[in-house]
């Protein structure tokens, strides 16, 4: 990952990461992907804010406004867009004008939308680094370059929602697949999310290539980064995770 030179320092490369980098697929076309039933998958735009605010609460009641705020940030997905424009296989964080760690996290985050032939938004997916866990690491004194390495290791699917009138066309599946392709194509090792522990979605995510973990089982990433990093489910939740290179370890 290309980071501001003033903030980088030498580290011992992880052989898994080097090997995985050699196997990277080209990043997803951020200008838009053909989806099912004539829909297209693309990055959200400011004009999509009303639809994002309306749809995301279908996934989780509290994240609609978060999505609208993300769309209001000029940093949203900029690290991904720069990689696409420069034909790189890793995110680019140099030259973005980032003023804080939050800006850099936003540059690695994305909102994907599914739009119909008329441009109407029928589905949305929010993804971002695990900012709560990484924020705790920053407070514990972990240097920013190591935080950015971790942010380029794991991404969270915070929510995916499809308009009720558009369900049954595979839009949610297309959004999730596009998210996985986008981030693994730029070198991420793990994409994860959470479901209610009593959810009936286990088979769905399994069919999409995720492993649904047992209650209270977490994800360890310490073997891929330079500090102890693990993600644990909140009470009443289970995690699901997709490993890009088979490098997963339980926490």
Image (cartoon, rainbow, N blue to C red):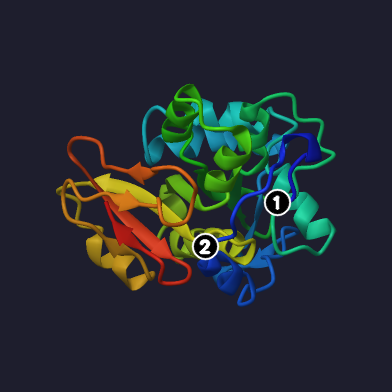
Q: Which residue is drawn at 74% across and 24% down?
A: 99
Q: Which residue is nearer to you in this view: 69 or 250?
A: 250
Q: Quadrant of residue 187?
A: bottom right
Asked whether, in this view, residue 179 is left or right of residue 2, the answer is left
Looking at the image, residue 85 lies above or below residue 228: below
Q: Mark 2 points at which residue?
A: 180
* Residue at x 58% of width, y 58% of height: 183
Label placed on residue 7: none
Indicate the secondary structure of the residue bearing disc 1: helix
Give the secondary structure at mark 2.
helix
- Residue 86: name its quadrant: bottom right
Q: Find residue 206 and report its horizontal and vertical position in percent.
A: 30, 68
Residue 205 pos. (x, y %): 32, 63
What distance separates the C-alpha of mark 1 from that of mark 2? 13 Å
Q: Quadrant of residue 94?
A: top right
Q: How many marks?
A: 2
Q: Nearer the viewer, residue 11 or 66?
A: 11
Residue 234 image point, x, y percent: 25, 36
Q: Is residue 53 left or right of residue 9?
A: left
Residue at 45% x, 58% y is 190
Judge from the rendering whether residue 32 lies leftward or rightward of residue 158; answer left or right: right
Q: Is residue 168 visible?
A: no
What residue is drawn where x is 48% and y is 68%? 244
Q: Which mark is residue 80?
A: 1
Q: Alpha-carbon neighbours of circle 2 within 10 Å: few (<14), some, or many (≥20)?
A: many
Mark 1 / mark 2, whichever is N-terminal: 1
Q: Is residue 108 visible?
A: yes
Give the image location of residue 1, x and y in percent: 69, 53
């Amino acid at each position: 990952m290309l980071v501001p030179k003033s903030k980088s320092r030498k580290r011992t490369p992880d052989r898994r990461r080097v090997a995985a980098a050699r196997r990277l697929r080209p990043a997803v076309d951020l200008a838009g992907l053909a989806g099912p039933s004539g829909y297209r998958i693309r990055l959200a735009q400011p004009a999509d804010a009303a639809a994002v605010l309306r749809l995301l609460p279908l996934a989780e009641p509290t994240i609609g406004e978060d999505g609208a705020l993300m769309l209001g940030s000029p940093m949203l997905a900029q690290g991904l867009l720069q990689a696409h424009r420069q034909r790189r296989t890793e995110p680019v964080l140099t030259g973005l004008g980032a003023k804080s760690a939050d800006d850099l996290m936003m540059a690695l985050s994305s909102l994907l939308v599914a739009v119909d032939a008329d441009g109407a938004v029928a589905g949305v997916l929010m993804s971002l680094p695990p900012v709560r866990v990484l924020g705790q690491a920053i407070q514990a004194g972990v240097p920013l370059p190591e935080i950015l390495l971790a942010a380029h290791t794991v991404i969270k699917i915070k929510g995916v929602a499809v308009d009720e009138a558009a369900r049954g066309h595979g839009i949610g599946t297309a959004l999730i697949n596009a998210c996985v392709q986008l981030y693994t194509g730029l070198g991420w090792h793990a994409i994860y999310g959470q479901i209610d522990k009593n959810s009936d979605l286990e088979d769905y995510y399994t069919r999409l290539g995720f492993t649904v973990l047992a209650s209270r089982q977490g994800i360890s990433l310490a073997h891929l980064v330079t500090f102890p990093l693990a993600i644990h489910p909140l009470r009443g939740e289970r995690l699901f995770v997709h490993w890009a290179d088979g490098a997963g370890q339980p926490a």
